[in-house]
């Protein structure tokens, strides 16, 4: 990549939109994941009895089990959300940017 | 304190990655297991032959020519991650402690979304064959390559020890073969796959194994649920009835009770995963960032699904194995009570396979467990060989001017050498306590490989000096704290009390690495530092857009 193309890409509005929008989304999802995981870990470390509450009256299943399974599904859901937006919005921006630069 | 000890014991046993503790009584020859295993070996050797015809260039050898699809790579990544440790270790932990097994699974999984959001696409856009390509992109080649290669080789060898010892014991137990035969067999097969078939064969071995493991585990979980008319209430209440811990298996036990260990374990699992060379290398096998992204999506799905299965399998084992004298070590029970399993607690899933599917299915699951080790070992060796041939030989020794044919030859020699080293270490460590090795591998990956890689992509002010000083101190801190920690200091060296109280050093060693990288970068005013910083913009544009990235080769 030459100095000139770097300058062109760096100042291209589509590039700036791609970078700012994608990093905002990626960091938001990352923080969300960390927040969910470390909240879970902190409950285990400080108030594990919360997870032992029965799911409903008379059930042997604790709320901890559906919560744990939900975290697994949540992780997968987040990756799905990211991939969906990246496949449509970000790939489109990238394509347009590439087309503009070639001109 | 008691709780902490329990936490450590469980951690040790899980991190031991599929190892089976104690002396193992050799089982009678298991014919159906051997037949199924031979079928697997035959099929994979045919794939290796096919792959060898297509492995001509260095790019074919290291990355299968970049022609793997996102879905295939997702399965292969899941295959790398669903090692014998995950399958036998986590289902064994559920069997032993119930809910705590789920906590572990979640820790192993949550790193993946973060890898997707922040790392996978950039890695693909910047790298060629190894993660050192990315870390050294704008920094001075030699020192960064040496550091990265050292981190990669250390991780690979530690991991290999655990896998080889685990495989020897597992095969001794399941197939009735002597320990040394098993270790040599694994080593030789792995050398064949990697030297002849390169990444293409390694990937397909991994995919087949992942498919077999997922279908086997699905069958077991469905069989368990079928037994309870697909009612979780019935499954869990039967488990609570027979388990010694009773209702406690439905909620967190002693696994994660002190916050420092909890966070430190989380850091080790999350950052360690993002610093494992054989996992990072998988991102270069796909054609572009889009496929890299898809790989993680599929991998997360498969791994998450697999962990849900192991949870059901563990509970199934509590009900169907725990009180069945057929699976219990009666001699041990007579001596110390409880319900010790034949072969140890990691055998819960294996015994359950017999309980739900008889000898035939036991043979299938045993063969899958062996295949799992074989596949993981191949991926590890390929990553180690690439660090030696691509980073050390081609880019440090030959200063980057080296023809491909020579580089390939070196990588094949390195594979054979690593295979021999792995066999040697596997035999040498047979009777040793190796509980620390996988924990140490994760700690090194998290404290040296990851910080350097991450900051090279995200922090424009990183300099060569900062990366080297920080990477080395992270590595040293991880090793020293593991030695001074309870596993080595108390369990192996036999001292009364550990100098460093926590089993997982990652929280501390990762912090050391980041602080030192930062400090030695911002105070660096050398000519090289200016060049390092000036290179960031071009690197960032390539990492964001893929413009100028290594493409897939033509086939």
Image (cartoon, grey):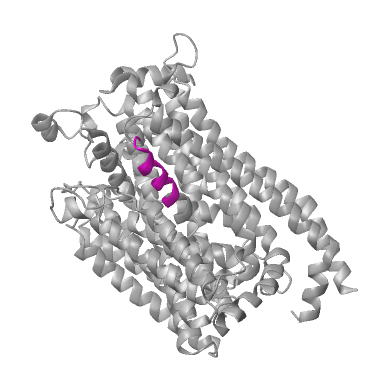
Q: Is residue B179 left or right of residue B406?
A: left
B55 to B112, vertically: above or below: below
B413 to B296, vertically: above or below: below
The residue segment tinted magenta is B257-268
Residue at the far top in the pictured view: A58
Residue B533: % across, % down: 62, 75
Residue B546: % across, % down: 71, 67
Residue A51: % across, % down: 44, 24
Which residue: 39% across, 44% down? Answer: B87
Residue at the far left in the pictured view: B335
Which residue: 42% across, 71% down? Answer: B384
Which residue: 64% across, 60% down? Answer: B121
| Magenta run includes residue B32 | no
Quarter holding the C terminus of chain B? bottom right
* Nearer the observer, B31 or A28: A28
* Nearer the observer, B522 or B541: B522
Q: How many labels were placed on the picture? A: 0
Q: Is residue A57 left or right of residue B181?
A: right
């Amino acid at each position: 990549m030459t100095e000139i193309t770097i300058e062109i890409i760096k100042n291209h509005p589509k590039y700036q939109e791609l970078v700012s929008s994608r990093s905002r989304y990626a960091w938001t999802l990352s923080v969300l994941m960390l927040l969910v995981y470390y909240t879970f870990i902190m409950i285990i470390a400080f108030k594990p009895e919360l997870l032992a509450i029965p799911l409903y009256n008379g059930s042997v299943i604790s709320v901890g089990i559906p919560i744990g399974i939900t975290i697994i599904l949540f992780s997968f859901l987040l990756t799905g959300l990211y991939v969906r937006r990246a496949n449509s919005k970000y790939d489109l921006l990238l394509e347009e940017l590439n087309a503009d630069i070639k001109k | 304190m008691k709780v902490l000890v329990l936490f450590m014991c469980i951690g040790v046993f899980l991190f031991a990655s599929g190892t089976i503790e104690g002396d193992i009584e050799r089982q009678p020859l298991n014919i159906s297991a051997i037949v199924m295993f031979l079928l697997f070996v035959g099929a994979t050797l045919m794939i290796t032959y096919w792959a060898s015809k297509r492995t001509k260039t260095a790019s074919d050898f290291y990355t299968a020519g970049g022609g793997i699809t996102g879905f295939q790579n997702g399965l292969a990544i899941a295959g790398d991650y669903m090692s014998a440790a995950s399958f036998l270790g986590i289902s064994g932990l559920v069997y032993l402690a119930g809910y705590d097994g789920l906590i572990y699974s979640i820790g192993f999984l949550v790193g993946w979304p973060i890898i997707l959001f922040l790392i996978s696409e950039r890695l693909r856009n910047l790298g060629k064959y190894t993660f050192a390509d990315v870390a050294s992109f704008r920094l001075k080649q030699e020192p960064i390559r040496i550091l990265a290669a050292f981190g990669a080789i250390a991780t690979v060898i530690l991991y290999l020890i655990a896998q080889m010892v685990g495989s020897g014991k597992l095969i001794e137990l399941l197939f009735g073969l002597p320990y040394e035969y098993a270790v040599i067999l694994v080593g030789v097969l792995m050398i064949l796959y990697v030297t002849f078939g390169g990444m293409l064969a390694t990937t397909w071995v991994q995919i087949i194994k992942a498919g077999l493991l997922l279908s086997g585990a699905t069958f077991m979980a469905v069989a368990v649920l079928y037994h309870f008319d697909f009612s979780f209430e019935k499954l869990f209440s039967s488990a609570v009835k027979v388990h010694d811990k009773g209702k406690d298996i439905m909620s967190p036990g002693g696994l994660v009770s002190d916050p420092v260990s909890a966070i430190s374990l989380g850091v080790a699992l999350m950052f360690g995963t993002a610093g494992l060379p054989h996992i990072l290398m998988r991102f270069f096998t796909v054609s572009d960032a889009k496929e890299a992204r898809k790989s993680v999506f599929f991998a997360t799905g498969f791994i998450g699904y697999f962990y849900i299965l192991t949870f059901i399998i563990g509970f199934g084992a509590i009900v169907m194995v725990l009180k069945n004298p057929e699976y219990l070590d009666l001699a041990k029970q007579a001596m110390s009570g409880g319900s010790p399993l034949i072969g140890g607690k990691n055998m819960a899933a294996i015994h359950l396979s017999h309980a739900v599917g008889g000898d035939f299915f036991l043979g299938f699951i045993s063969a899958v467990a062996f295949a799992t080790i074989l596949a993981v070992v191949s991926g590890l060796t390929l990553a180690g060989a690439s660090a030696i041939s691509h980073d050390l030989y081609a880019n440090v020794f030959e200063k980057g001017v080296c023809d491909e044919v020579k580089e390939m030859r070196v990588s094949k020699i390195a594979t054979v050498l690593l295979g021999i080293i792995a066999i040697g270490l596997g035999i040498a460590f047979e009777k040793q306590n190796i509980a620390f090795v996988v924990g140490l591998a994760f700690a090194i990956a998290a404290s040296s490989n990851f910080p350097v890689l991450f900051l090279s992509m995200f922090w424009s002010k990183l300099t060569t000096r900062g990366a080297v000083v920080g990477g080395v101190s992270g590595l040293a801190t991880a090793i020293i704290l593991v030695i001074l920690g309870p596993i080595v200091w108390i369990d192996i060296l036999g001292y009364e009390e550990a100098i460093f109280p926590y089993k997982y050093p990652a929280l501390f060693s990762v912090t050391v690495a980041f602080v030192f990288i930062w400090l030695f970068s911002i105070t660096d005013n050398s000519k090289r530092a200016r060049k390092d910083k000036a290179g960031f913009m071009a690197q960032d544009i390539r990492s964001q857009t893929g413009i100028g990235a290594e493409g897939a080769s033509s086939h």
